Amino acid sequence: MCVGIPAQVVELAPSGPHTAIVDVDGAQREVNTIMVDDEADVPLATGDWVLLHVGFAMSRIDAAEAAETLAFMRELGSVYDEEFEAFSSDLP
């Protein structure tokens, strides 16, 4: 299963062209932006949101979509954690 995670651009080109530092819930990573650099006539900017997968910014998304997706992912995470905990507690 492939999951894209919304990430916000906090710094552009820290180590060269087609790179950016992005933030996901306080964790920051350098990613490759080549797939979104030529995606629109408007250059990628600090504050923009991207969909991140395996170290690559795959596409741009707007802030509303990012917030909705992050909320959904957090919701799934807690549901999964609760189910796993319940499943584990049934073990002998």
Image: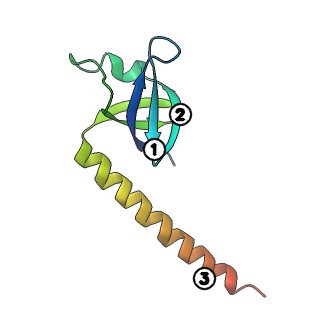
Circle on res. 86: 3
Quadrant where the C terminus sits is bottom right
- Residue in the picture at 52% in, 69% down: 80
The image's mark for residue 24 is 1
Q: Does 46 sit above or below residue 77? A: above
- Amino acid under label 3? Ala
Which comes before the other along the chain, label 1 or label 3? 1
Q: Is the residue under label 2 in contact with that under label 1 (CB below 8 Å)?
A: yes
Q: Which residue is mark 2?
A: 29
Q: Are marks 2 and 3 in contact (CB under 8 Å)?
A: no
Q: Residues within 10 Å of mark 1 (few under 14, many from 20)?
A: some
In the image, which is nearer the foreground, mark 1 or mark 3? 1
Q: Residue at x 45, y 39 (%)?
A: 23
Q: CA distance from mark 1 to mark 3?
A: 28 Å
Q: Quadrant of residue 71?
A: bottom left
Q: Residue at x 45, y 44 (%)?
A: 24
Of callouts 2 and 3, the N-terminal one: 2
Spatial separation of the CA atoms under disc 1 and disc 2: 8 Å
Label 2 vs label 3, nearer the camera: 2
